[in-house]
Image (cartoon, rainbow, N blue to C red):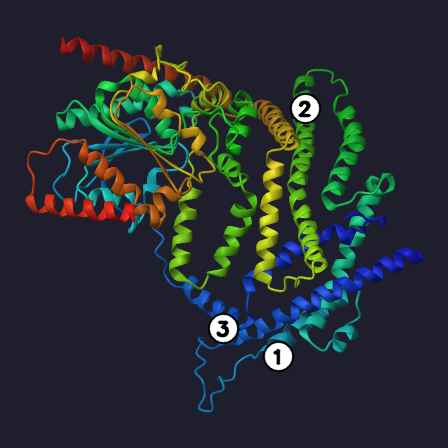
């Protein structure tokens, strides 16, 4: 709006006043309902809320430095012969896979009889700042794998990996293919040469050396701030307006608080690993180009010959499809599948819709590639088969 | 105050009054009902005739608030307490209360803008631009003088300590300047969304369509526009350069601060980050060697 009139300072304030106004009006909504919401909100906020996350029982069976290996207590006889090892990213925590009963990938896997191990990177401290990608891939991941293989007396296990944990698992699979029976990648970036996501654009412009020199480890809060700035309107305003609108709804509030607890539980990232990841992945795109060298060995994607299932989200703003959809064309496997779900980065694990697709698909895919276990409980097997069919129907539906 | 300014202020007053009255009318009703609702569960079972048991009613709460703000306004000086007595409703009263604050805020901003020369040197079109000019003006003028003083050569035994201290102050100031510029950039989408919504409403009116009356629809329109403007900003070179500049100045500040603190810590029985990092690095290398040796022993044992 062009005008000859010199703008008054109060005109300049108008956008901020209007922002506050619109938010207040949106929250208040219908006046008659508003007072009722406030009354109920008081009841909700003052009552005990169930906001615990990651409540599925597990044992820590292996530890090395700060890194721990969780083994979830099985609920049934194993339906698969091969245990599943889950590698989460070092950004945020693996508790997201077990957010709450009914929205837990771990729970679904256990119910289907999968034997689950999960790597917990825990919280790096300043002494971890020199740990490299090599230390994580050929060190911690490899040692945890060896532990599981030895414990079960087997030569191979299944790996399911998430986000940056997936990128490291791709590196691991290329360097140690003999130890992996099946590989499941979920929202795993391997191609960083695209402009689909803001994260890529920003990461390429950052100077990782300066950040690492300043902080040692990269603080989780700094990374979280970066994630919030990916979409400030939705993540810093609209989300909380949504909460205020539903503040009278106990279940909504509980779910919201759980998600907040997970989002802002952000361990720092070891400085050297961050530096290498930004430089080698985001800036030089070495992995997909087969130019990455770890621990003196070339990471050749053609070495990945085991079956691979690659799942990603169509609306993922952190790891967009362009970051994931080249993987299967670059690896050596002949048994490989891409699955793009209609969801985002986190929704893939927690939305009720993908709960019906994501975990059942993985269970089915693994079952098809697993030899029948020796000690089979007939009833369990029948119910698992029945469940598999139901899951398949749900996915198709 | 000249005639033009008087007219402008008067127009502002009308707009402000409409805005406050319109919104507060709805809030007054909501507050009344809410107040009743909040009282009810606090031991106020309805009496036989259906009225709640007597407790502080909205009028009494309003009266208490009124007296509080009356006392407050008497301290501020304007408006006169009598103005409140003339107020017939909560919106009227709130308007009277907000007016001096609003006026004072504008006065402060004017003073600040005049002091920094922002209004004298040009016509900033929005708050983001104004903040940018004010910051730039401050750091280009006062900041430059300040920097010269900080960089006066130091002499004598303490010169290195003094230099490091001055450098930390200088870098803190530069970081503050960069951070303000970065935050100012983040204000721009808020302003663009505001004008975008206005344009949309004008467009609807021109097309003869009904204006958006529903607050929910208006909010949706605003948040969508805000998101679009943020997306455009966050991809821009301007944003990238500012972000990079802010992070670089943050690094310079933290490095300078660290050097300054090292001087302090050296006189105390506390290890510095630098010393601890050297130790951690030694520990890291040793652990790596031990792990490699362990693997070698395991491999040899298998043979």
* Chain of the residue where label 1 is placed in the rendered structure: B
Q: Is residue B267 left or right of residue A249?
A: right
Of all chains, the one bearing label 2 is B
Q: Secondary structure at mark 1?
A: helix
Q: Earlier in the sequence, mark 2 or mark 3?
A: 3
Disc ID at residue B59: 1
Q: Specify the subunit that label 3 lies on.
A: B
Q: Position of residue A18 (x, y in %)?
A: 67, 56
Mark 2 to mark 3: distance in Å? 56 Å
- Viewer-proximal residue among A51 and B11: B11
Q: At x 50% / y 33%, what residue is drawn? A: A197
Disc sitting over residue B38 in the figure? 3
How many angstroms separate mark 2 from mark 1 (CA)?
Answer: 59 Å
Q: Marks 2 and 3: which is nearer the front? A: 3
Q: Is residue A36 left or right of residue B293?
A: right
Image spot of residue A210 (x, y percent): 55, 22
Place of residue A51 in the rendered image (x, y in percent of width and height, measured from the top left): 36, 53
Q: Is residue B122 left or right of residue B233?
A: right
Residue furthest right in the image:
B2
Local packing at callout 2 (Cα closer than 10 Å; few below 14, some 14-19, many 20+) is: many
Q: Position of residue B69 (x, y in %)?
A: 69, 68
- Vertical placement of A4 versus B169: above or below? below
* Residue that carries the numbered disc 2 in the rendered image: B167
Q: In this view, which residue lies farthest toward the bottom?
A: B49
**A223 and A113: which one is in front?**
A113
Q: Residue at x 44, y 64 (%)?
A: A248
Q: Is residue A139 visible?
A: no
């Amino acid at each position: 709006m062009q005008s000859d009139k010199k703008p008054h300072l109060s005109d300049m304030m108008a956008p901020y006043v209007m922002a506050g106004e619109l938010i207040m009006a949106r929250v208040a909504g219908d006046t008659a309902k508003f007072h009722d919401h406030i009354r109920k909100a008081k009841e909700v906020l003052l009552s005990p809320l169930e906001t615990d996350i990651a409540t599925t029982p597990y044992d820590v069976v292996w530890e090395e430095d700060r890194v721990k290996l969780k083994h979830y207590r099985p609920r049934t006889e194993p339906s698969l012969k091969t245990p599943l090892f889950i590698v989460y990213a070092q950004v945020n925590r693996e508790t997201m896979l077990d957010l709450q009963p009914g929205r837990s990938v771990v729970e679904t896997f256990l119910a289907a009889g999968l034997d689950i191990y999960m790597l917990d990177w825990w919280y790096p401290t300043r002494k971890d700042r020199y740990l490299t990608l090599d230390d994580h891939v050929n060190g911690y991941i490899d040692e945890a794998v060896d532990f599981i293989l030895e414990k079960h007396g087997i030569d191979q296990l299944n790996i399911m990996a998430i986000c940056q944990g997936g990128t490291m698992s791709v590196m691991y699979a290329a360097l140690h293919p003999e130890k992996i029976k099946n590989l499941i990648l979920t929202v795993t970036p391997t191609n960083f040469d695209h402009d689909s996501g803001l994260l890529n654009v920003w990461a390429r412009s950052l100077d990782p050396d300066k950040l690492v020199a300043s902080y040692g480890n990269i603080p989780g809060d700094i990374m979280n701030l970066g994630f919030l700035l990916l979409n400030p309107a939705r993540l810093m305003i609209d989300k909380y307006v949504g909460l205020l609108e539903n503040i009278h709804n106990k279940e909504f509030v509980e779910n919201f608080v759980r998600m907040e607890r997970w989002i802002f539980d952000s361990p720092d990232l070891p400085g050297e690993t961050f530096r290498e990841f930004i430089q080698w992945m985001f800036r030089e795109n070495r992995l997909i180009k087969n130019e990455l060298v770890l621990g003196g060995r070339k990471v050749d994607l053609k070495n990945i010959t085991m079956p691979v299932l690659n799942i990603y989200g169509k609306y993922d703003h952190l790891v967009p499809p362009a970051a994931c959809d080249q993987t299967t064309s670059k690896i050596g496997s002949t048994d490989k599948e891409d699955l793009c779900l209609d969801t985002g980065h986190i929704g893939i694990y927690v939305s009720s819709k993908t709960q019906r697709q994501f975990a059942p698909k993985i269970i089915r895919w693994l079952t098809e590639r697993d030899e029948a276990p020796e000690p089979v409980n007939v009833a369990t097997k029948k119910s698992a088969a029945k469940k598999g069919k139901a899951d398949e129907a749900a996915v198709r539906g | 105050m000249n005639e033009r300014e008087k007219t402008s202020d008067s127009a502002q007053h009308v707009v402000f009054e409409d805005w406050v009255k319109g919104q507060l009318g709805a809030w007054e009703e909501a507050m009344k009902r809410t107040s009743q609702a909040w009282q009810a569960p606090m031991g106020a079972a309805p009496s036989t005739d259906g009225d709640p048991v007597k407790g502080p009613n909205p009028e009494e709460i309003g009266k208490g608030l009124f007296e509080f703000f009356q006392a407050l306004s008497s301290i501020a000086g304007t408006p006169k307490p009598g103005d409140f007595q003339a107020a017939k409703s909560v919106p009227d009263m709130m308007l009277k209360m907000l007016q001096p604050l609003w006026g004072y805020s504008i006065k402060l901003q004017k003073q600040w803008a005049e002091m920094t020369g922002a209004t004298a040197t040009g016509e900033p079109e929005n708050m983001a631009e104004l903040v940018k000019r004010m910051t730039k003006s401050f750091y280009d003028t006062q900041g430059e003088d300040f920097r010269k003083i900080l960089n006066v050569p130091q002499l004598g035994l303490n010169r290195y300590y003094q230099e490091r201290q001055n450098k930390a102050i200088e870098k803190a100031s530069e970081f503050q300047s960069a951070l303000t510029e970065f935050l100012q950039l983040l204000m721009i989408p808020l302003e663009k969304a505001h004008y975008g919504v206005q344009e949309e409403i004008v467009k609807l009116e021109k097309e003869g369509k009904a204006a958006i009356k529903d607050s929910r629809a208006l909010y949706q329109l605003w948040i969508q526009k805000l998101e679009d403007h943020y997306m455009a900003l966050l991809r821009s070179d301007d944003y990238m350069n500012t972000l990079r500049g802010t992070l670089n100045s943050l690094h310079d500040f933290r490095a300078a601060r660290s050097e300054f603190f090292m001087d302090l810590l050296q006189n105390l029985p506390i290890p510095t980050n630098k010393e601890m990092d050297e130790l951690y690095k030694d520990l890291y290398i040793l652990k790596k060697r031990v792990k490699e040796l362990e693997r070698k022993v395991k491999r040899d044992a298998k043979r």
